[in-house]
Image: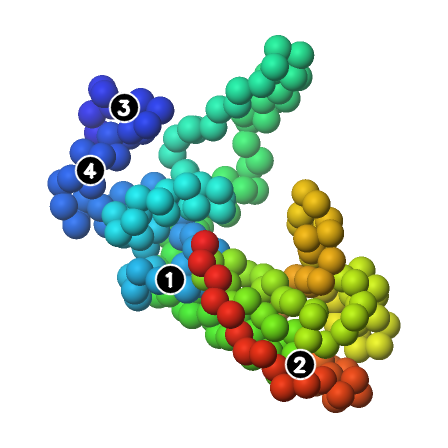
Amino acid sequence: QDWDGSGPHNTLRVLELIADGPVATQELWRYLCDVDLVGTISSRFGPADHPLLQLLADPRALGLRIADGLWLRLVDVGWVIAAPALSQGIRKVHDFLTVGAAAPLQAAGTVALGLPDRYYGDLVAAYRTRRDRLVASLDAAGLRPTRPDGAYYVMTDLSGITADDDVTFARRLVTQAGVAAVPGSSFYHDPALGRRRLRFAFPKRAETLAAAAERLASLSSAQGTATPAGVREMSG
């Protein structure tokens, strides 16, 4: 690999590798970018489920992938701009974080690099199935879910099922149905914007999701929930 010409915006000469054609792009995908499970659960760009192919289809995806935790294995591209007082503390922490890596994580990374493509394909398919199952359950319970286009959690709207705020209803879900969710207000700078929302996660065992569906249905029936408003789509 020719390292000359690499820079913060073209690390490892990525642009040249992509320009070399599909084979080089595939190699870059395999050895540089971790399988982005969050971003490949579902994709508007088609069945390819490759972050780099998504980037080529829409350059705006780059910002989404980095913000969503795209992991670059072979190069450190992180940087921080901060006031001098904050920068001093950041530099001290950075020094200790980057001097050494955890040996178990290095061993696990080696195993992950050797796994066959089928493993990741099956894993993505399993997460997609879990997502669809949870979304259907939430919709049936009248919680107005927004189907994620790249996440392992689902945000819902409480307006159709209760007049409670997010914290009150989350507590009631735990005590009355045994289902845990995160109050939506915790994800907003202005908590008022999330007072009518709950967030559910689906990286669970199939039997756990099935049990949650039954409990949500029971709670919904007890409250006499109206016909669900349907599932909305969300990008990003």
Q: Position of residue 204 (x, y in %)?
A: 61, 68
Colouring scheme, one of rainbow, by chain, secondary structure, one colour: rainbow
Instruction: Name the one closer to the observer, 189 or 203.
Output: 189
Residue drawn at (38%, 34%), measured in percent from left and top?
Answer: 74
Mark 2 to mark 1: distance in Å? 26 Å
Determine whether label 3 and label 4 are within 8 Å by CB: no
Q: Residue at x 73, y 49 (%)?
A: 191
Instruction: Please state if 225 lies on the left or on the right of 109 as rendered.
Output: right
Q: Secondary structure at mark 2?
A: loop
Asked if residue 7 can be seen in this view, the reply is yes
| Residue 6, numbered label | 3
First in residue order: circle 2 vs circle 4: 4
Looking at the image, tell me whether mark 3 or mark 1 is earlier in sequence order.
Answer: 3
Q: Amino acid at mark 3?
A: Ser
Question: Residue 213 versus residue 191: which sits nearer the camera?
Answer: 191
Residue 43, labelled with which disc?
1
Q: Element at badge 4?
A: helix
Q: Residue at x 79, y 63 (%)?
A: 165
Looking at the picture, tell me which residue is in the foreground, 23 or 136.
Answer: 136
The amino acid type of the residue labelled 1 equals Ser
* Circle 3 SS class: loop
Sequence-wise, the earlier of marks 2 and 1 is 1
Residue 44 lies in quadrant = bottom left
